[in-house]
Image: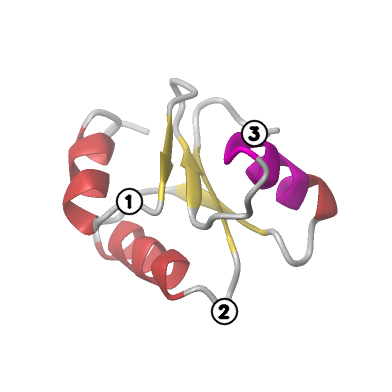
Amino acid sequence: MTENTNTIVVYGASWCPDARRSRAFLDDNGIHYTWIDIDENAEAKAFVKKTNNGTVVVPTIVFPDESILVEPSNPELAAKVKLFEGV
């Protein structure tokens, strides 16, 4: 479902505190990403549901290597984005 394989894609919802925290972390660290609000995109919501075994869990974050983190803590996100600093 990701549109650009060179970009981190954050699937989330504006009402989700974990999605807001992850976005703030990425913003604060100057990490480029694409935001997709699953409440505004049925295809994205279906992707998140499929990825999480039938459950809608956000944020679901897809990285350029196609690995996925779901509801990562800031330290988990920091460790992962360090691998993609050039993205």
Q: Position of residue 13 (x, y in %)?
A: 60, 68
Q: Nearer the viewer, residue 29 or 80?
A: 80
Q: Amino acid at mark 1?
A: Pro
Q: CA distance from mark 2 to mark 3?
A: 22 Å
Instruction: Reply above or below: 21 against 81.
Output: below
User: Residue 71 occupies which quadrant of the picture?
Assistant: bottom left
Residue under pointer 3: 2
| Left or right: where 36 falls relative to 72 | right
Q: Position of residue 84 (x, y in %)?
A: 30, 31
| Left or right: where 74 falls relative to 23 | left
Q: CA distance from mark 3 to mark 1?
A: 19 Å
Camera-nearest label, 2 or 3: 2
Residue at disc 3, secondary structure: loop
Residue under pointer 2: 15
Residue under pointer 1: 72
Which badge, 3 or 1, is on the more N-terminal residue? 3
Which badge, 2 or 3, is on the more N-terminal residue? 3
Quadrant holding the C terminus? top left
Task: Please check the rendered image and state whether residue 63 is part of the magenta-colored stretch, yes or no.
Answer: no
User: Residue 21 occupies which quadrant of the picture?
Assistant: bottom left
Q: Residue at x 57, y 41 (%)?
A: 52
Q: Amino acid at mark 2?
A: Trp
Q: CA distance from mark 2 to mark 1?
A: 17 Å
| Residue stretch rendered in magenta on the structure | 44-53
Instruction: Reply above or below: 79 against 77.
Output: above
Residue lying furthest right: 42
